[in-house]
Every structure is written in C-alpha cells, then in structure tokens.
Image: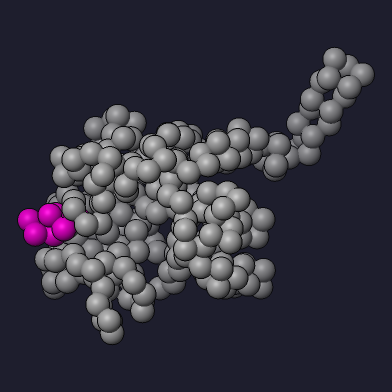
Amino acid sequence: MKVVILAGGYGTRISEESHLRPKPMIEIGEKPILWHIMKEYSHYGFNEFIICCGYKQHMIKEWFADYYLYNCDVTFDFTDNNHMSVHNNVTEPWKVTLVDTGLNTMTGGRIKRIQKYTEGEAFCLTYGDAVSDVQLDKVLEFHKKSSRIATITAITVDQRFGVLDIHGDGSVRSFREKSEGDGACVNGGYMVMEPQVFDYIEGDDTIFEKGPLVRLAEENQLGAYQHEGFWQCMDTARELKKLEELWQTGNAPWKVW
C-alpha cells in the first residue's frame, strides 16, 4: 500500500525555519522530519511513498536525489576520469515519487493531483509535520474492518485542530473546528483512504479538512482509530525544540525502527 505525505505547504507558523526550507525538511537529529515519518511507515512494511510537494519543492527532490551520498562513505578519484566509488552503501527499501502539486494548492487539491499515482488503490495519508508511535498496522486493520471510505487517527491534545465527534462504533459523526476550552479528540493524520475519496475533492481550492472530511462524517463514511500514545506536531520553534530534545536524549517515542 502506498503512503501519501502532504509536504507542500508554506509552514508559516514556524517561519524561523520554513523561510529557508520546506517545513517537512526541517531537521530533528540532523534528519528531516519527513525522513522520520517515512521511517515510521517503513517499520510497518510501507515502503512506497508519494510526496505532495509545493513550496521549495526542489529542496525535497535534491535531498532524495543525493540521499545515498548523505548516508555512505564516498571516494572521489580525480585521477581516474573523476570516478566516484560508494562504500558501505546504506539505502532504504523505498520507492519515492515526488509530485509537484502546486505552490498555493490546498490540502484537498494536493491529494487530488496525485490520484493517478495511487493507481485506483487504497492508500495511507498523513501530514509531513508530525510524528507518533501509533501502530500503523492496527490503523490499517481498523480501517479494513470498518468498511468506510476514510479512517483518521484520533488523538487527544489541547491544540487548535478540527474536533471529532466519535461514536462507540468508531464512526465519526461530525468534523468541526475546535472551540475555546474544547477537550475533544482531534485528527492526528496517519489516515487510510479508499479511492472513492477522490470523488469528494473538487479541485485545487478544496481544503481537505473543511470539505471532504466534513461530508464523509455526515455520510457515516469516516472512521477514527483512537490513539492513546505519543503524538507531536512541529508547528512552532518550541515544538521543534521539544522533538530535538527527545531525540538527543534517546527518548523519542516515535523511533520504533
């Protein structure tokens, strides 16, 4: 199953870093957060990725183009027609498709633009700015049992995301913006989508969280896998610092590989 990662936004909330590079390329432990997310998925056997690029997309493409150079010992022999030898070749078992989904395209529009690369199959979907220790195999199992078009991973945090009204059978009956003092579950990404989800997206201006997810909830086609463990987005410099400290001290819960 392919994994679609939204990595095209401006990242304005963490502009201290994002004015230099795309938000998913901001580093934790000298590796982009995008790499950390992909390592999570790879641990559970998901090794084919579709990256929705936009803002400063060339930096993402260049990083992957030179990935093996960053992770191997290399000898450049200028006496032998500029020959290059790669030693201790360490690579990931990944197939990565990098797609230009536009500079100002909304989240739904970015998903719509990669439709042909999903080849009519169900796919995983997540954001390129959050890490978690969610058991991704359990999310997929929950999705298959629910027989709904879409499944999201629900988490409980005191933040500013869309609020979920989850019923006992795991279905989401409403998807709304968070209110002051609201302590409900929110969408933490780590989603699974059936190909029918593309029918809910009109075009580049569609905000996935305000259109398609709302409709899916109203039609009882949105399920929620409830995750009680670690989840952390990287929206601010403070949150980046927190993630870096967890990594450097060897206490990063998302490091399951």
Q: Position of residue 226 (x, y in %)?
A: 28, 69
The N terminus lies in quadrant = top left
Q: Is residue 98 above or below residue 184?
A: above
In magenta segment, residue 216: yes
Colour mapping: one colour
The answer to whether residue 122 shows anywhere in this view is no
Residue at x 60% of width, y 35% of height = 62
Q: Residue furthest top?
A: 81
In magenta segment, residue 114: no
State whether the magenta stretch is mostly helix, strand or loop: helix
155 left or right of 249 in image: left
Q: Position of residue 198 (x, y in %)?
A: 20, 40
Nearest the eye: 29 or 52: 52
Q: Is residue 62 above or below residue 5?
A: above
Residue at x 28% of width, y 84% of height = 181
Nearest the eye: 255 or 189: 189
Residue at x 19% of width, y 67% of height = 176
Q: Is residue 62 above or below residue 78?
A: below
Residue at x 47% of width, y 56% of height = 11
Q: Position of residue 140 (x, y in %)?
A: 29, 53
The answer to whether residue 113 shows anywhere in this view is yes
Nearest the eye: 225 or 157: 157
250 left or right of 111 in image: right
Quadrant in the rendering for residue 82: top right
Q: Residue furthest left?
A: 219
The C terminus lies in quadrant = bottom right
Q: Position of residue 41 (x, y in %)?
A: 45, 51
Q: Residue furthest right?
A: 79
Nearest the eye: 21 or 77: 21
Q: Residue furthest bottom?
A: 181
Image: magenta residue range: 213-219
